[in-house]
Image (tube, rainbow, N blue to C red):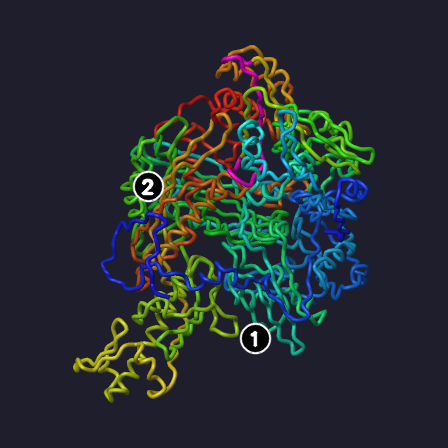
Amino acid sequence: MATVKTKKTTKSKKASQIPVRYRVIGTRPIRHDGVDKVTGRAQYGADVQLAGLLHGGILRSPHAHARIRSIDTGKAAALPGVKAVITSADIGPVTDRVVDLGEGATRLQHLRDNILASGKALYQGHAVAAVAATSPHIAQEALRLIEVDYEVLPPVLDLREAMEAGAPLLHEDLHTDDLGTKSMQPSNIAKHLRFEKGDLEKGFKKADQIFEREFLTSMVHQGYIEPHNATAFWNADGRLAIWCSTQGGFTVRQQAAAILDLPVSSIKVIPMEIGGGFGGKIHVYLEPVAALLSKKSGKPVKLVMDRAEVFEATGPTSGSHIQVKIGARKDGRIVAAQAQLAYEAGAFPGSLVVCGMMCIFAPYDLEHQRIDGYDVLVTKPKTAPYRAPGATNAAFASETVLDEIAEWAGIDPLEIRRLNGAKEGTRRADGLVYPRIGFLETLGAARKHPHASAPLEGPNRGRGVASGFWFNVGLKSSVTAAVNSDGTVSLTEGTPDIGGTRTSVAMQLAEVLGLAAADVKPQVVDTDSVGYNDVTGGSRVTFATGLAAIEAARDIERQMAERAARLWGVPASKVKAAGGVYRHATDSKKKITFKELAARLDETGGPVVGKASLDTSASAGGGFGTHIVDVEVDPETGKVQILRYTAVQDVGKAIHPSYVEGQLQGGVAQGAGWALNEEYFYDDQGRLANASFLDYRMPTALDLPMIDTVLVEVPNPGHPFGVRGVGEVPIVPPPAALANAIYRAAGVRLRQLPMNPGRVLEAILTRDGKPPSKA
Amino acid sequence: MKNFAYINAASEKAAIESMSDKALALAGGTNLLNLLKEYVLAPEALVNIKGIAGLNAIESFEGGLKIGANVTLSELLDHAEVRGRYPALHQALYDIGTPQIRNMSTLGGNLCARPHCWYYRYEYFDCKKRGGQGCAAIAGDNEFHAIFATDGPCVMIHPSSAGPALVVYGAKVKIAGPGGSRDAGIEEFFTLPAAAVARENVLKPNELVTHVLLPPPNGKSATYEVRHKESHDWPLAMASVALTMAGETAQEARICLGAVAPVPWRAAAAEAALKGKVVNETTAGEAAQKAAEGAKPLSGNKYKVQLVRTAVKRAILAAATGRRV
């Protein structure tokens, strides 16, 4: 397959060019997994078929909070076709300890209890028991025969109520870690964190005006198309194999090993193709359950969730209550900023409130700040990361207050951001000092974009602006790369490919070796077949696995140079490699291409394999985005129509611009859904009413205009090509940008998500008659 | 879902003989299968009626149309006469669900669909329609529930999008049962929960809608729907309007609301308000105000009162002008 220039589906403009000529990077080759995906041949977890395969099902709690007095599985086990029934008792004795899964420490008891409830069910949909049978239908029938005796307890659904003393407790043994001190009384507040910089009171004294506002956001789901699934086979020799849909085979291995009390080396995880994750496919739910069912039945067992299970029992991101207080001078300069963020953790500790705290004021250079965060338990599913977890909620609050300040000060929204904007050397409240970043460049590119100055034609229309930040992570990646005799390279990765990373990683290896992207054959393999890799998450794969690929390519290049030296009988130091051609340093007649050399490996010492294992954490580069959106608000229905959307982002260096544009567009689409459509409806007993896509209103292509993207390239100094993570930043600004646009269109400030027709209409019908200002 | 027997009915008679409260008719299945999966319904048998001859045609009939119950929504939408002469029906069906759903869903199924109230659709909620003691919607999340007839035992909204349009055209429903065939006026076909909470229409368990009879239209008509999403979504409120015009004056007006009551909800006061008036923004707005009179919204759906006004006003203007407003 030749490298081709694909037709540009969006107009991407490079606001600042990097003066380096690349042969592969920045082009748009066809993705290596494209044919399998478009022809339906790609194998997903639900496609796994094994001889003797049993089908499982999970019994889930109908109660949001209930003590499990007893579980009688007798009738279910007696149903013909049922081969195994398990409950938490089958996990084995638990010695509670803290386990570090590379993504933060968790109590083993909590990890185990989330996959099968032991003492209490802590949310409606919490797994209580599981069955394996010869058909999915028998498994479903068997689940209805399991008798569970529940003592129903009062649920806690509102996070502010959950924080109050006297609220029903989810975990009687959980005490607040309050800035490092354990609380005396048990509480639903798992953690209180604080970041502080400067002298807040001193800062507020300099303010001409102080803006204090309060925000509420609903829990929302990642909404990946493919439901969770897992197939497990516990072999008679004690080896466990797991096929599943995950963002990281190694994290599944680690979590399963901890839960099942096995050495990691006993488990092989085979990550199948993944139909979307967005952070929601990092926690394990089904994998250890399938393993236990397999152990008990002696057969391979497959579990596949339906959509209701996905909504009820897997990864929503936190709903939140955020208070923001910002002091500003008349000239638009912010003198002090304070925020308090309370995030729903769900049934077990571990919301990503800390990420919200890191991001809330991250785009700005502010001398005096204090940010408090609370991780709060409620009787809802344990939350999971969702694309820039915590940052979108936070930016909704800070970026709409900034819009109010801009209006009060009479300053353009882009200009007030420039005035206060962070740059290289700015220190964030959590202590990090920025290396080279591109926030101001996004503001400049946004200002220059025709959208920023286009007239708004027609009534009830408004334009909103908001910015956002995500820090992006590095973490650990390993690859191996084997040179084939036909001059291609087989690249072995361990980070599941969600956004086209087989290709974006292969392109970096190809660039170093002077090959075409199609000459590299990337594959994602199981945990026995490659060195350790952290998850596909934190917008890290093109950056971190890319760095590993570059390192492996250099390893290959060094070995190939030695082979050329051997052919010519000269010291390796005499061979110079560039652009896929190896030359003698002084004898211009001696040169050989990579492909020619690859054909002669056998005569020069045998196969060549490059490898790299890196911890890239120190060199990840943060990303900033600035979005402009035009909306029309129907004053008689409250419906918000997005007319035009432009997302500007510093992407460092776009390896494959189509995928980068796609990430920006996808992030905007999800952010718009979060802003305008999506929410969970729990009744007062904590039972979910809208566990389907019929009632959980994710936007479709028809709800969104073409989303224009502008790729600003301010290289990350921590990567040879300048790559920054790009996938998460674009979900951060949309809710604030849309709220600001709605205000300019309809004169109403919405501080609660989603901004659906009912809520917008009620705000319009009760508005104080203040005319909206011009955008 | 529970295992069930599958009966392939070759004729109306065979279907009727097989059907009972434990053997349910299966047409497109877009509604029924979801309910089976959730164990809301767990029949012993499904009676496939898709193979019955004569139920899948659109024929001319007494100057109007006779539409078989198995005609799909896509077929209706593609039919030149439906599009040309019955715009309120065409607009009501135009972007229901998704193309796949419209390819499977039938007109009979649209009329007989069970409520999409989420308290009905999940077995762990209390629901009188499923034999429970109370209605979880009254104290629960009722943003999408009824604002009319909310003093009854059930505050569902009728899910039929075709219903209001058929009401303004004065359609009839042909029903086949053990004793033969009978015609019911479309408004008599739908029943309020107060009459029988477990069902939404007059059909007995062994009766079948076989046809919809549309009389010739005598005027202009339109439907306006307020919906959150552009696709794959339920209406928040809708209004179908048929006007008999003399010049710019409405001699007669028929106005029916959808998605706001347990049945397609005739707005008689709005019809009276518009009758004899020149149709314009002002008179349409006045009729719209009347349409919302008598609404008793629940705790979470006051906004739907305004949506009714908007839908009625825009449907009247769309009918009068022939343009979408």
Q: In the shown orientation, is residue A57 left or right of residue A322?
A: right
* Circle number at residue A417: 2
Label count reads: 2
Give residue B19's position: percent from left, percent from top.
Answer: 79, 42
Q: Is residue A13 magenta?
A: no
| Residue sitting at x 32%, y 49% | A12
Give residue A294's position: percent from left, percent from top.
Answer: 68, 69
Q: Which residue is mark 1?
A: A265
The kind of secondary structure the magenta stretch mainly shows is strand
Instruction: Name the amino acid type tagged 2.
Output: Arg
Q: Is residue A15 above or below residue A87?
A: above
- Is residue B20 or residue A492 the one in the foreground? B20
Q: Is residue B61 visible?
A: yes
- Is residue A91 or residue B68 the one in the foreground? B68
Q: In the shown orientation, is residue A728 left or right of residue B211?
A: left
Q: Is residue A765 above or below residue A390?
A: above
- Mark 2 is surrounded, within 10 Å at the Cα level, by few (under 14), some (14 to 19) or many (20 or more) other residues, namely many
Q: For numbered disc 2, what is the local secondary structure? A: helix
Task: Look at the image and give the residue range highlighted in magenta.
Answer: B228-250
Same chain for labels 1 and 2? Say yes or no. yes
Q: Is residue B309 above or below residue A409?
A: above
* Circle number at residue A647: none
The disc numbered 2 marks a residue on which chain?
A
